[in-house]
Image (cartoon, rainbow, N blue to C red):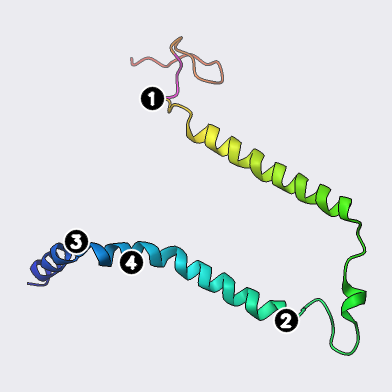
């Protein structure tokens, strides 16, 4: 009985397009709400300072702008490189079979074992 009612509910739900679209939108919306709440909480708090011991001006970085830009450029380059490598690996054709090449040798250079 429960299986039949579950299948019926799934059939009814699949006809409600607005409900399906709202579920799809709700997935990234939860992450956006979580990050927005964290930003609102942390912006005014300045957690890198200690109340009545360290002023905000003392805890701010003294790095020059070109150093910060170079660090950001390097980080972006690393992320871009990783994304390119992963996309290349994901688009490689999959090898079929037992791991032997067309010559009958495996990747270590050993021959294929025969039955008998």
Tell which tag, 2 or 3, sits nearer the viewer: 2
- Residue 95 falls in which quadrant of the image? top left
- Within 10 Å of the Cα at label 3, are there few (<14), some (14-19), or many (20+) other Cα atoms? few
The image position of residue 113, as x and y in percent, is 42, 16
Q: Residue at position x 39%, y 64% from top?
A: 25
For the residues marked 2 and 4, what is the alpha-carbon distance in whole angstroms? 33 Å
Disc assigned to residue 14: 3
Disc assigned to residue 57: none
Q: From the viewer's perspective, is residue 105 above or below residue 71? A: above
Residue that carries the numbered disc 4 in the rendered image? 22
Mark closer to the chain start, 3 or 1:
3
The image position of residue 108, as x and y in percent, is 56, 20
The image position of residue 74, as x and y in percent, is 77, 45
Q: Residue at position x 43%, y 12% from top?
A: 102
Q: Mark 4 and mark 2 in contact (Cβ < 8 Å)?
A: no
- Within 10 Å of the Cα at label 1, are there few (<14), some (14-19), or many (20+) other Cα atoms? few
Residue that carries the numbered disc 1 in the rendered image? 96
Q: Residue at position x 77%, y 79% from top?
A: 46
- Quadrant of image for the N terminus: bottom left
Residue that carries the numbered disc 2 in the rendered image? 44
For mark 3, give the secondary structure: helix
Mark closer to the chain start, 2 or 3:
3
For mark 4, give the secondary structure: helix
Tell which tag, 4 or 3, sits nearer the viewer: 4
The answer to if 112 sits in the magenta stretch is no
For the residues marked 2 and 3, what is the alpha-carbon distance in whole angstroms? 45 Å
For mark 1, give the secondary structure: loop
Q: From the viewer's perspective, is residue 41 above or below residue 17? A: below
Per the rendered image, the range of residues in magenta is 97-101
């Amino acid at each position: 009985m429960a299986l039949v009612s579950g299948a019926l509910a799934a059939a009814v739900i699949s006809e409600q397009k607005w409900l399906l679209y709202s579920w799809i939108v709700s997935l990234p919306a939860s992450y956006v709400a979580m990050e927005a709440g964290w930003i609102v909480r942390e912006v005014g708090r300045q957690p890198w300072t200690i109340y009545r011991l360290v002023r905000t001006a003392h805890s701010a970085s003294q790095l020059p702008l070109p150093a910060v830009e170079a660090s950001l450029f390097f980080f972006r380059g690393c992320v871009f490189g990783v994304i390119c490598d992963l996309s290349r690996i994901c688009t490689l054709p999959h090898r079929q079979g037992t791991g032997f090449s067309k010559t009958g040798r495996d990747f270590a250079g050993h021959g294929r074992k025969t039955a008998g």
